[in-house]
Image (cartoon, rainbow, N blue to C red):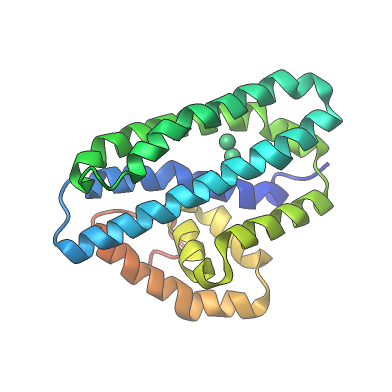
Amino acid sequence: MITQEQLSGFMLMHAAFRTEFGRLAEACPRPRDAEHMDLLEEQLALVLEMLHAHHRHEDETLWRRLTGREPAAHEAMAELEAEHLALDPLMRAASDRTTPLPERAVVLARLHEVVNDHLDHEEQAAVPLMLRHLTPEDLESDKRTAMNDFGRRRVPVIFGWLASCANDEQVAATLADLPPVARLMFRLFWWPAYRRRFAALYGAGVPLANSVLAG
Ligand SMILES: [Fe+2]
Ligand SMILES: [Fe+2]
């Protein structure tokens, strides 16, 4: 058994997936110039890659772990896996650079809706099982998988992205969970750099999800 706070990393990934396709759908119809277009493409590719990795981990590890410990959950987990499969064509269309980025904005808006519906379902069906059956050791191993998926070089930008989508409690929990050196790096370098990236991507008009880092 684990607590809601121990699940904050998983919930933070969800918050980031819930947010970013909506931001991209707003920004992609009107890129300022070629440089802005490249940055939007890069951000979209990063978020899609992270979503694929998240689904892979759930399908290959997490759902099996949960059904192993509560066999009655099999049907609900199979539904979630089927929803991942159903998201694939939309994710492929979102990443298809043969369609100009502004024309892909409608796909991104649809992806935003479908991802949010899937996450609503998952949080209602899987999170109670996770709280009941996961152990701190499972979470440690999941964290290692996530860090491998991020890749060392991309940790600063991914932590910046997650922080830009986090609410106040999620920011506090994530910072408290980081080793002191990483916490310092985040405050001094990663977050200021991500704020510049965020401004370049979305301008000043898009609000952050928290007040802790907004100042
Ligand atoms: Fe998930
Ligand atoms: Fe999922």
Q: Which quadrant of the frame does ligand 2 lie within?
A: top right
Question: Across the whole image, how many numbered discs are drawn on residues?
Answer: 0
Residue 168 drawn above or below residue 64: below
Q: Residue at x 63, y 80 (%)?
A: 181
Q: Residue furthest front?
A: 98
Quadrant that contains the N terminus: top right
Query: Is 150 situated left or right of 62 in this image?
Result: left
Residue 29 locus on image (x, y percent): 18, 45
Q: Is residue 71 left or right of 143 when viewed as pictured?
A: right
Instruction: Provide residue 172's location: percent of width, then percent of height.
Output: 58, 61
Q: Position of residue 102 (x, y in %)?
A: 19, 45
Name the one closer to the observer, 63 or 172.
63
Can residue 204 be spotted in the picture?
no
Of 122 and 37, which appears nearest the observer?
Answer: 37
Q: Residue at x 49, y 57 (%)?
A: 162
Q: Considering depth in this image, is 81 or 96 the residue closer to the camera?
A: 96
Does residue 189 sit above or below 118 in this rendering? below
Q: Residue at x 54, y 79 (%)?
A: 185
Seen in the image, is 101 located left or right of residue 176?
A: left
Residue 121 appears in the rendering: yes
Q: Residue at x 48, y 81 (%)?
A: 188
Residue 179 image-quadrant placement? bottom right
On the image, the x and y values in percent for residue 135 come to 83, 46
Quadrant the C terminus occupies: bottom left
Does 52 appear above or below 117? below
Say whether residue 202 is left or right of residue 42: left
